[in-house]
Image (cartoon, rainbow, N blue to C red):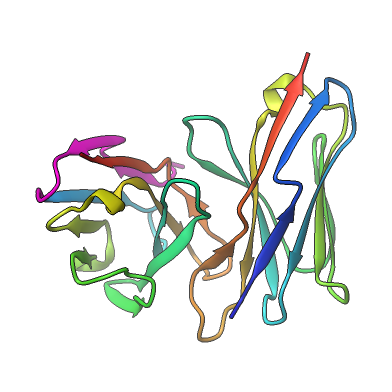
Amino acid sequence: KNEVEQSPQNLTAQEGEFITINCSYSVGISALHWLQQHPGGGIVSLFMLSSGKKKHGRLIATINIQEKHSSLHITASHPRDSAVYICAGYSGGGADGLTFGKGTHLIIQP
Amino acid sequence: EAGVTQFPSHSVIEKGQTVTLRCDPISGHDNLYWYRRVMGKEIKFLLHFVKESKQDESGMPNNRFLAERTGGTYSTLKVQPAELEDSGVYFCASGLTEETQYFGPGTRLLVL
């Protein structure tokens, strides 16, 4: 059974701080999605990665395949980054659909 | 390019009634997925269409849920009869490949 574990569950930080959200996943997951959901909003796909590192603006996602671990970093955090961040694993093969973590509720205070 | 759209955005119904949710994927995307998040839990996979065929419906909770994708374009998810535990947010996603998925805004369903 595929599993995805996220930490922390909740995170409150001050504007400008460097943020790290972690995700560990089980054997069988070959790619990882990082998703963002603002309060009352839909889900936005931030990154999909199966190796290495990706960067978009102030967001950076890394994945370590050997350790089955991925991190999402936010540099120079801003109150508008406040949202739920979700990692979801894709396993392909016979197990369709993504396996989701519980999400990290991030609040950036001004 | 238009994204994945879902209708309605919100639905409030009484227990025992029927509700039909609609998802319009990005044009040309053969893969279409339904997911849902019930209160306090993580998002769970419901089913996956490739064109008009159900590739995997292992996540459908019970036979009160029926999904269709006639013609391989938009999809509907019908809940009949709705129960209280069906309340949650229903997301649709589409993709050219199984790996890359673009999500819709979700339909918030409340069963009273």
| Quarter of the C terminus of chain A within the rendering | top right
Q: Which of the 4 image quarters holds residue B80?
A: bottom left
Q: What stretch is highlighted in magenta?
A: B1-17
Q: Identify the residue at image location x=76%, y=47%.
A: A8
Left or right: A5 in relation to A40: right
Give the vertical position of A29 relative to A69 (above or below): below
Q: Nearer the viewer, residue A49 or A17?
A: A17
* Lateral position of residue A23 relative to residue B63, left or right: right
Residue B32 is left or right of residue B40, and the answer is left
| Residue that protrudes farthest toward the bottom in the picture | A94
| Residue A45 pos. (x, y %) | 60, 48
Q: In this view, does B79 lie above or below A12?
A: below
- Would residue B35 be found to the left or right of residue A38 on screen? left
Residue B30 in sight: no
Is B2 placed above or below A33 here?
above
Residue in view at x 90 percent, y 33 percent: A18
Q: Is residue B16 magenta?
A: yes
